Image (cartoon, rainbow, N blue to C red):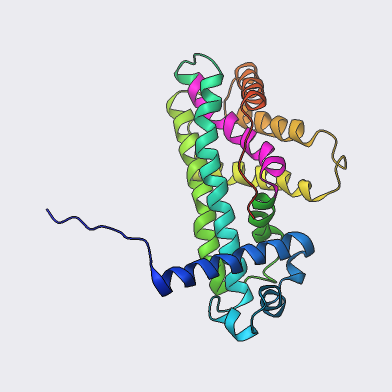
Amino acid sequence: MTQTLTTAPTGRAANRQRKRQEYIDTAIRIVLNGGLEALTMQALAREMGAAVGTAYTYFASKSALVAELQVLAIGRLTSTYADAAPRWQGEMGRLDAKGKAEAGLTTFVEFVVRAPGSLRDDFFLQLLLLTDGGRSILPEDQATVLEAAGQWATLVRELIDEAVEAGVLNKVDADRRAAKFVAMLNGASLFTNLPDGAIPDLPGLTRSLMIDLLCAWGADRKRITRSASKAEAAADQLELAAPALA
């Protein structure tokens, strides 16, 4: 059997990789401090103390750069959720098959509720796909972002399938339901762009929307409400602790 070993880049390749990461970190700071409008290749080069042409050797365009920032943010959100979900579910006590399926859905929503506060930078960047309207990311660069974001739709579909199999939800078109579930969460998430307090108890509203939607699909209101409360309590005990993106 032949085993392929992956080695870390050295020399010139390592220097280029390190410099490229510096450009990414600088771009993130520019966006977070001044918004997407402040991020230009000229501004990036100026902050890096480099010629504009040098910046273009790392990124073909602002569009390609913004797309990469979004993919990185989505990846960090995904890995943070993958770490948090089992810990939260473990904190919810002994669960039967139905309880585990319910917990899968309620902990996912609890993560979405918590992410804007605990992973503010990542959450802001991943929302750009919905809020930017294609102004900063060209169609040819959107594909990579959509592919990364599609992981969330796939995850929701899997959680819904598990809930159907456990008898939590009735059997209908799972793909359609996953789309509705994601649309509900995205709609609620957009309110995070408003000033604090503009929507009273936005986390509570999001949980309530989830409960209403799941009950419309056959979930038991008392059980799913209890699961949501347990997920909230678990998240209070085991808070998200991802480092700042930059």
Q: Residue furthest front?
A: 11
Q: Is residue 106 above or below residue 178?
A: above
| Picture coordinates of residue 61, whole percent (x, y) | 60, 78
Q: Is residue 116 magenta?
A: yes
In the rendered structure, which segment of residues is drawn in magenta? 99-120
Q: How many marks?
A: 0
Residue in the image at 64% along x and 18% along y = 226
Residue in the image at 60% along x and 20% along y = 220
Q: Is residue 102 magenta?
A: yes
| Picture coordinates of residue 73, whole percent (x, y) | 59, 54
The quadrant the C terminus occupies is: bottom right
Q: Residue furthest left?
A: 1
Q: Nearer the viewer, residue 99 or 87?
A: 87
Q: Residue furthest top?
A: 94
Q: Is residue 154 left or right of residue 70?
A: left
Q: Is residue 212 above or below residue 125?
A: above
Dividing the picture into quarters, in which one does residue 22 lie? bottom right
* Predominant secondary structure, magenta span: helix
Residue in the image at 53% along x and 51% along y = 75
Residue in the image at 68% along x and 74% along y = 44
Q: Is residue 28 above or below residue 241?
A: below
| Picture coordinates of residue 80, whole percent (x, y) | 55, 41
Q: Is residue 200 above or below residue 126?
A: above
Q: Nearer the viewer, residue 186 or 88?
A: 88
Residue 243 visible: yes
Residue 169 visible: no
| Picture coordinates of residue 85, whole percent (x, y) | 53, 32
